[in-house]
Amino acid sequence: MRWPSLLLASALFLHDGVAGTVMWELPVGDHRTSLGAALDGHFLFEIGSFEVGFEPTVTNRGSWADAWTPVSREVYQINMPTGGIARLHTETAALAGRRAYVWGFNVDQPTREWILLTEETWTWPAEESSDGVNWVIDAESMAVVGESTSNGVVTSAAGLFADPVITAAEWRAANFVAPILRDNPAISGWEADPDADGLTNLIEMVLGSHPLIVNARHEGLPIGVSAPGANGVHAHVALAKRPNLLLAYRLELSNDQDLWLSNQIEIERDDLYQVSGKSMVRLAPLETQFVRVLVSIPQL
């Protein structure tokens, strides 16, 4: 699935206006994610339209980005209205007369959340209006994904589920299509590393990378930090999950990488989207601790 391209908002205003101008706004409110967290500056809101004949629904959300044309984009403003001026220009003049939508999304990898809003009256004007056109997101706005209430908007984890839930066996079959690859344990086995990038097929599945394409930067690997807490500095680790995969996760702690203990880790979060935790024993000066994430396939 392709995500909306990260165009700079300023680049969308470099052309002379050739059609009507719209003022749009997400007012200040109690705007939250599906997990209850307040929206922050990692959320972007685009206003634009989909191609002729494409009606966005929950079931076709994996195709939204390919059919989407943005007109302007704004970073979510905390304690300030989010929005601005949207003007059709040379490259987007064809949108005149089409239904407009506001698409909000989180660009952070671990917690991709979406909201898509529209109203019956949101149609791009073909020419300037002396009265101006003002679109405000409120409780009357229709949400294709997410919610719009009298208190604020609530995003949805719909973006995370653009791919159907699959088993490990289905993942392997989809990535090793040719029988000569799929039936060779040295290539398709869970401990094999056919692209020689240092990541086994199991790890490639966990990270969402392709087992036959080098992941040179090892993007998506667990993030480990040492951070202060109430009782001193502790080792922390977090791994973004792929909620469409049926896998089991466990965190373990070690001081020497020989003896690993799971009962020395305090789990801070373990849901569809992330597993994270910290050591129950604080770090002494110059001490080293190691935390690892074990991933297993329940079906095996």
Image (spheres, rainbow, N blue to C red):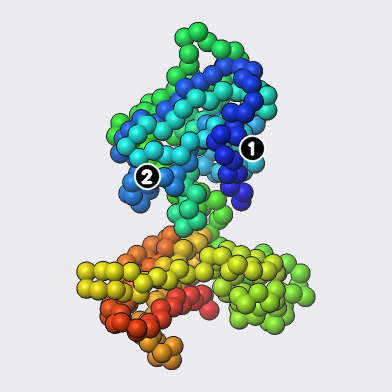
Is residue 21 shown left or right of residue 260? right
Element on which disc 2 rests: loop
Above or below, comparing residue 32 to residue 124 in the picture: below
Which residue is most to the left? Answer: 230
Q: Tag 1 or tag 2, which sits nearer the N-term?
A: 2
User: Please, what is the three-letter code of the amino acid marked with disc 2?
Assistant: Leu
The percent position of residue 143, horizontal first and vertical second, equals 44, 34
User: What is the number of the mark on residue 134?
Assistant: none
Is residue 143 shown left or right of residue 191? left
Residue at horizontal 55 percent and vertical 51 percent from the top: 162
Taking the image as drawn, is residue 189 in sight?
no
The percent position of residue 76, horizontal first and vertical second, equals 42, 39
Instruction: Report, in whole angstroms, how far the alpha carbon at label 2 lies from the one at label 1.
Output: 26 Å
Mark 1 Cα shell of 10 Å, populated few (<14), some (14-19), many (≥20): some
> Which quadrant would residue 182 be assigned to in this image?
bottom right
User: What is the number of the mark on residue 67?
Assistant: 1
Residue pointed to by mark 2: 39
The percent position of residue 29, horizontal first and vertical second, equals 31, 35
Of residues 53 and 17, the one nearer the viewer is 17
Element on which disc 1 rests: helix
Residue at horizontal 56 percent and vertical 12 percent from the top: 128
User: Please, what is the three-letter code of the amino acid marked with disc 1?
Assistant: Ala
Is residue 156 shown left or right of residue 191? left
Residue at horizontal 29 percent and vertical 82 percent from the top: 284
Taking the image as drawn, is residue 210 in sight?
yes
Above or below, comparing residue 255 to residue 97 in the picture: below
**In front: mark 2 or mark 1?**
2
The percent position of residue 202, horizontal first and vertical second, equals 57, 74
Above or below, comparing residue 271 to residue 90 in the picture: below
